Structures are given as C-alpha cells and as structure tokens.
C-alpha cells in the first residue's frame, strides 16, 4: 500500500563523482516494496525545489528494514540530497508503480541495465536468484566510473557482462552488441546441439538444413525473459534486439513526473492495445514496467 | 469550532478548500491517502467532448519554486466521465465540479448539454484558459468578447452554478471578469497557469516537447493573489482563488484578498495529504483568531 514514510537516513556515500548510494531505515517500505517499484523523495519543507524526486528501489531488505537508493547528482534536488547527513529524517512516498513480474516457467533470465537503470536490477536479480533462476546481467554506461553493482551481482551468483561507451571497462560501445552476441551464440549452440542429437539418433536430415532459425534456437535454451531498465533510447535498442530473437521483455521506464501516483498525467507513454489501437498510459502508475511488445516507440 | 461551510452562488460546500482541476485527476489516486469526501469540492481533470491523448513528453519541467506543465488535456472524454468517473465520485460522497474544455464554441455547448442533469454534479467550471492546446484553450479566455460568448453559450445549456476559469495571460483580467459576469457567470475561478518556458542548455532546445507550458506552484502565488484582489473589486460574484497555495496561511491570504473559496493545485502532487492538512490548519487558525466562520475573513484586505 502506497503511503508517506518518515525514513531515517543510515548511509549516504559517494560511489563515484556525482554518483551516490543512500540507505534508509523504512521497515514498511522494505517489507512491501517489490523490485521495479519506485519511491518519490521529498527534498525539503519549503517547496523549492518543489517536486519530489523519483528513484527506483535499488535494494530491499525486509529483515533489517532497510531500503537502498542510488542516485546521480544532476540538478538542485539531487545536489541537496548529496549533502544530507546520517540520522536525518527523509520523507518518502511509496512504494509506487507496478514492478517486474516473473513466473516459475523460465529458469534462465537476462537482465540489461543502462546507467542508473542498473539500480532496480539489483533487488530484481536477488529475487530471481532466490527463485532459483540462472541470471546473466549486462551492464552498460558511459564509462567505468559510472558502473556500479558489479560485485553485488557476482555475489548473488549472476554472470556479468560489461560495456562502456568509452571502452574504459568491458566491451567498447553499447551493451546491445554483447547482448546480441550472447543471444546469437546461445541460439546457434542450441540449434547445432539439436541437429547433432537428431543426427546421432538417426532422425532428421541435418545436411539439408540451410536455414537456421535463431528464434526457435533461443526458445530451446531456457531463456524466456529479458528485463531491462534505463533511458528510453537504451530500452528501445535492447527491446529491438530481444524482438529479433522473439525474446519477451519487461522494460522499466524513466520519465519526468510530478506526482508519481497517477494524478498529474505528466509521465505519458504510448501503449498498444491488443487490437492494435494506441492508448496513453502513465509511466508512474500503469508502469514503470511495460513489456517490449506493447510499447509504441516514438522517434 | 469555526464554521467552514460556504455557499457560492448555489454551490454549497462543507468547507472552502477545493482541489484544482488537473491536479487531482478524478480523485481515485488520492482516495488511497484520505477519504476524498473531505475535499470541499473536486474540480475534476479537464474534460473534452472526445477522449484526448494529450501532448508528447516531456510534459513536465521544474522551475524555481514551481513547475511547468504541458499535459494538453489528456482525459477520457465527457461520456466516460459520466458513465464511469462521476458515479464513482458520487459513491465516495465527493462534491464534484466538472471542468469543461472546447476546441470550438459548439464543443462547449455540447459538453454542457451532456452534463445537464447528471446525478450528483454540483457545478460546471468552464476552462477558457488552458495554455497547452493549439485549438481553443486560452484563445477563448484572452479576448473579452470571446470569453463572453463562451459564457453565454454554456449558460444556455446549464442550470448548475456556472464557474468561469480565468487566464492570467492577459493585460487586464478585470476586463475579462466583467465580460463573463455580464453573460451569466455565477462564480469566477482564478488563476489558471501562466505561460512559461525552460530551455535545456545541453540540447539548446526548449525542454518541453510543446516548447511552452503553464507555470504553477508557489512561484505564481503573488501574481494570483494580486489578480484575485483586483477581480474582487471589479465584480460582484464569488471568487475561487488559486495559484501556489501550499498551506493555510496561503489560503487565508486569498480569502483576505476577496476569495470566498480556494483551490489547491500542484501542492497535492508534492504532498498528497495537502488538502486535508490545509482544511485542518485553516480551522485551527480561525479558532485561534476567534472567527466564528471562514466567511468572516473574506475580503478583509480589500477595505
């Protein structure tokens, strides 16, 4: 149930220049929050800056009652946040929006995070690992200093692949390239294994195969779901790769919002109905997670 | 305890604090935080004849002590309001004001016609001041003759208390106020947002997709207050004052400037409990100052 919480600030430390991690004691939020949901943080009492700031939940620990937020100093609000000292009471509205979902079906999942979009993938990866799934995580950012969470993903038992635009860490370029390589390799491997098995059992006519169906190939690998979070162009690119392999995706969007609860209509997104018509949804309350198949991409 | 009841030209409300149109949706989102029947009156999200998808994003930009919005009247249309939203609001015992918008004079007339007799609807607020649409919108509210004509046309089709929402984007707001009152406006609400813009120096382009948007929040309060004060002296109808109200002190200033009721807008975005908090603080202040009724402070700053 969304509500206003008075949380106690336990930790507020720089991970890199302009990149901060905040830990708060907020037992109800920690217990009720789900991966992919977000909170709206009030900056101050005097309404300047006026609006709350939205942050995806980057950590949820119901046992200790703690939540974690990761933020980048980009303006007046986050600048003020970066000066907050431990012990301070922070006014937080949440948990908001609908989070990521998963079922027991898919035993192997792929995560892709761009920039600050890595943050919501941390509690997601933990939940998916707790559910017994194999998790591979693709992380991308402009440069190495802006990457975070790598150790945490490793500790959870996830495979991690990195990409930076400047090549300071991992693949040089966008993470869609290693993502596509991975999917292609998995799919090809599956196709050849199947062909080999068919050949060995004397069935099938492997030599007549001139067309390799990568979509079918990937479907047989156990990878049935991709989760991504990041800026819209990043999500669009990741979603395009996923769709080439008929891989269903859940995308968590970032958008400017005033209220975070569905009242202001500021954070609009175009979503396809099943009959192909388009509706305008709210990122905050109808999302922030939408499937790659239902999003109507503009521009 | 001070009496908070007000009656504005037949619009009877249990307290004088309304939710401003566009800042409270159709009430559903706030009912999760408090029973929305506590709001004096809910001016629902602006309605158009047909459903409206609104403007492209970004639609929101923060400004010093304020925000710009360029929503573009995204709404499900008057028929969906009547079939879905209004019955739900009435079920919550909410006091409902329909905010109507037209691309043409005929649109305004047709919406008013459809709303006539709607069970539970308390009043109609005519928005002749939306800065975020290309056709109609603020165009109707910046010319006295046009504002008067819209009022006359809607007046023909409604027996409900008729509120005209005025634009601050004019040289002399009293001129528009007089024009709409002469054609049968029962109540005036002011102000709508002030046209403004933000430029993103990284992209060298306006930040909002539609380039300009409506400014609201504490930044506009002095302007809104001045306009309420001017209009209160120019016409004899009750005024619903709004613009940057975030607490009881702000609301009290509007009453003293001549408003008989106030509306809270974007404060509800920041603090969902804003309206009940303001009602509570207002009541406490009236008691503390020894006023028997909120009506006793209306216009105190006019003398």
Image (cartoon, coloured by chain):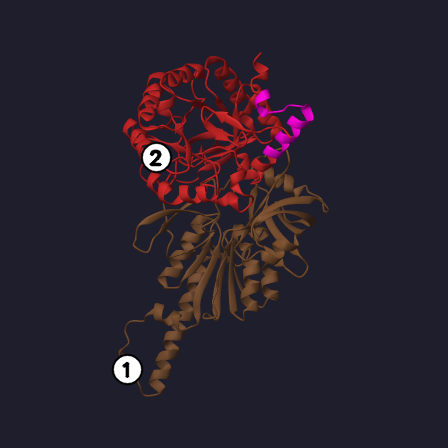
Q: State the separation of the CA atoms marked 1 and 2.
A: 71 Å
Residue of label 1: A205
Which residues make up the magenta segment?
A: B279-297
Q: Is A135 placed left or right of B148 in the picture?
A: right
Picture residue at 59% right of the left edge, 60% below the top: A150
Placement of A236 over or under A42, stated as above or below: below
At mark 1, the secondary structure is: loop
Q: B182 or A195: nearer the eye? A: B182
Question: Is B17 situated left or right of A15 in this image?
Answer: left
Q: Quick one: label 1, few (<14), some, or many (20+) residues within 10 Å?
A: few
Rendered location of residue A264, percent (x, y)? 47, 39
| Circle 2 chain | B
From the rendered image, report the letter of the chain displayed in red: B
Find residue B115 and name its label. Answer: 2
Residue B294, horizontal then vertical, whole percent: 59, 25
Which label number is shown at residue A128?
A: none
Residue A278 lies, with reference to residue B16, above or below; the image says below
Residue B84 appearing in the image? yes
Is the residue A12 above or below the residue B279 in the image? below
> Looking at the image, which residue is at 26% across and 78% down?
A208
Q: Residue A247, position in %: x, y?
A: 39, 64
Chain of the residue under label 1: A
Q: What residue do we see at 59% from left, 28% from top?
A: B3
Rendering coords of residue B26 (x, y %): 45, 41
| Magenta region includes residue A73 | no
The one of B38 and B257 positioned closer to us in this rendering: B38
Q: Who is closer to the viewer here, B14 or B49? A: B14
Residue B287 colored magenta? yes
């Amino acid at each position: 149930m969304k509500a206003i919480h008075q949380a106690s600030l336990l930790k507020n430390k720089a991970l890199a220049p302009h990149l901060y991690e905040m830990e708060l004691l907020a037992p109800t939020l920690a217990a009720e929050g789900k991966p992919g949901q977000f909170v709206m943080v009030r900056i101050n009492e005097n309404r300047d800056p006026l609006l709350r700031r939205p942050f995806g939940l980057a950590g949820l620990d119901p046992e200790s009652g703690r939540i974690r937020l990761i933020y980048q100093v980009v303006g007046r609000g986050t600048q003020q946040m970066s000066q907050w000292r431990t012990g301070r009471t922070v006014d937080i509205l949440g948990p908001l929006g609908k989070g990521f979902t998963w079922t027991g079906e898919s035993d192997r999942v792929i995560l892709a995070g761009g920039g600050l979009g890595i943050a919501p993938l941390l509690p997601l990866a933990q939940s998916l690992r707790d559910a017994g799934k194999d998790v591979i995580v693709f992380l991308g950012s402009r440069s190495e200093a802006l990457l975070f969470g790598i150790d945490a993903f490793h500790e959870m038992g996830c495979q991690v692949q990195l990409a930076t635009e400047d090549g300071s860490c991992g693949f040089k370029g966008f993470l869609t390239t290693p993502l596509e390589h991975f999917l292609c390799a998995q799919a090809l491997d599956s196709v050849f294994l199947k062909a080999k098995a068919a050949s060995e059992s004397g069935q099938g006519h492997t030599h007549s195969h001139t067309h390799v169906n990568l979509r079918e190939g990937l479907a047989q690998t156990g990878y049935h779901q991709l989760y991504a979070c990041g800026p819209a162009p990043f999500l669009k690119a990741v979603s395009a790769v996923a769709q080439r392999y008929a891989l269903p995706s859940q995308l968590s969007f970032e958008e400017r919002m005033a209220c975070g609860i569905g009242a202001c209509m500021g954070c609009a997104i175009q979503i396809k109905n099943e009959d192909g018509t388009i509706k305008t949804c709210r990122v905050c309350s109808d999302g922030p997670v939408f499937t790659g198949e239902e999003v109507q991409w503009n521009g | 305890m001070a009496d908070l009841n007000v009656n504005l030209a037949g619009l009877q409300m249990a307290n004088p604090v309304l939710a401003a149109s566009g800042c409270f949706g159709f009430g559903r989102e706030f009912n999760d935080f408090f029973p929305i029947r506590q709001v004096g009156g809910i001016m629902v999200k602006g309605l158009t004849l047909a459903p409206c998808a609104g403007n492209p994003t970004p639609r929101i930009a923060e400004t010093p002590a304020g925000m710009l919005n360029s929503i573009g009247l995204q709404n499900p249309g008057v028929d969906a309001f009547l079939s879905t939203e209004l019955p739900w609001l009435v079920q919550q015992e909410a006091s409902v004001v329909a905010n109507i918008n037209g691309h043409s004079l005929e649109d305004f007339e047709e919406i008013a016609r459809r709303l006539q007799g709607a069970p539970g609807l308390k009043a109609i607020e005519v928005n002749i001041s939306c800065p975020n649409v290309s056709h109609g919108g603020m165009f109707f509210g910046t010319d006295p003759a046009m504002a008067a004509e819209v009022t006359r046309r809607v007046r023909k089709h409604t027996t409900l208390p008729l509120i005209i929402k005025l634009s601050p984007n004019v040289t002399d707001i009293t001129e528009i106020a007089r024009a709409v009152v002469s054609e049968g406006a029962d109540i005036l609400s002011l102000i709508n947002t002030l046209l403004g813009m933000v430029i993103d120096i990284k992209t060298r382009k306006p930040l909002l997709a539609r380039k300009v948007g409506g400014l609201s929040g504490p930044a506009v309060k002095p302007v809104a207050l001045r306009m309420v004060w001017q209009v209160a002296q120019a016409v004899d109808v009750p005024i619903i004052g709004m613009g940057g109200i975030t607490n009881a002190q702000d609301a009290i200033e509007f009453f003293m400037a001549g408003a008989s009721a106030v509306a809270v807008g974007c404060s509800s975005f920041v603090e969902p409990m804003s309206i009940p908090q303001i009602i509570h603080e207002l009541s406490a202040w009236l008691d503390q100052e020894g006023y028997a009724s909120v009506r006793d402070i209306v216009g105190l700053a006019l003398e």
